[in-house]
Amino acid sequence: MKRRWLRFWMLVMLGWAYACNSSSGRGGASAGKDDLSASIARLQQAVRSSPDSAGLRFLLMDQLLQNNQLQEALTENDTLLQMDGSNAGVWYKRGVILLQNGDTVSGVAALKNALKDAPVFGEALLELAAVYASESKPEALTTADRVIQTTEDIWMASNARFIKGLYYSNVNDKAAALEQFSECIKNDYTFLDAYIEKGLLLYDQQKYTEALQVFEQAIQVSNTFAEAYYQAGRCQEALGNREEAELNYRKALGLDNHFSAAKEALEKLR
């Protein structure tokens, strides 16, 4: 079950700034992209004026990454490494860029370089653990455990448990996966993706009532979480509650009118 692994990896790679698709129109998204492009242009001008400023180059690299200008971001990273080849943060960002560009081998190597000088660099450890989890490698567990054992940040520890849950899902150890997702929710009840993963595991085992309860808990945490309504609708449909299923699908579409799975489920139900 590798259905949501890439979604989590994108959360990590975008600097822990992942946000679910909302019901905002395309105009708003375009405006946001225009603002980002304008910000990149200003930073490029600032870098030309102060080429020795590592801080400006780092900001530019981050924004290029957000704008999916991966080669340009890598070029800035090359310059930063020439300025300070032992900077763990620069190596971490290099790993992020390479992974986003599909170069897993080089990305992992860069993350390991980051960890040489900063062995408890939480973000780099989580990124590496996420890669291992996607490949069903048990190193995902030991790497995530390093975060749990060394961090005092509840959010970081919850992400580590979430990754452990993804690993167990990928190797089909459903009981262990459920335990990790439950622990993640216990540590941080706002961790919405953990509810979804837990509910999907229960759904796959045809435990539709239990799965529905989990998705409804997610809705209680955030009543604007479109996917929770969609998954609750699937459970209601499996239980034979067609009217409730239709209502949940409609709510999901009301929150995200580009939610194609919810639209298809509603049309099929009709």
Image (cartoon, grey):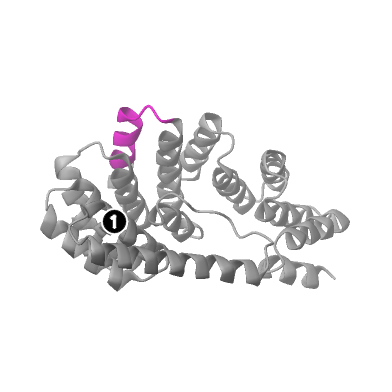
Which sits in the foreground, 84 or 156? 84
Q: Residue at x 36, y 71 (%)?
A: 69
Q: Residue at x 51, y 60 (%)?
A: 3
Is the residue 129 above or below the residue 69 in the image? above
| Quadrant of image for the C terminus | bottom right
Q: Position of residue 10 (x, y in %)?
A: 43, 58
Q: Main secondary structure of the magenta part?
A: helix
Q: Residues within 10 Å of mark 1 (few under 14, many from 20)?
A: some
Residue behind mark 1 = 56
Residue type at mark 1?
Answer: Leu
| Magenta region | 142-153
Residue 149 is one of the magenta-drawn residues: yes
Residue 138 shows up from this direction: no
Q: Secondary structure at mark 1?
A: helix
Residue 230 is one of the magenta-drawn residues: no
Residue 131 shows up from this direction: yes
Q: Residue at x 45, y 31 (%)?
A: 154
Query: Is residue 193 rendered to the left or right of residue 163?
Result: right
Report which quarter residue 134 is drawn in.
bottom left
Q: Position of residue 228 (x, y in %)?
A: 68, 51
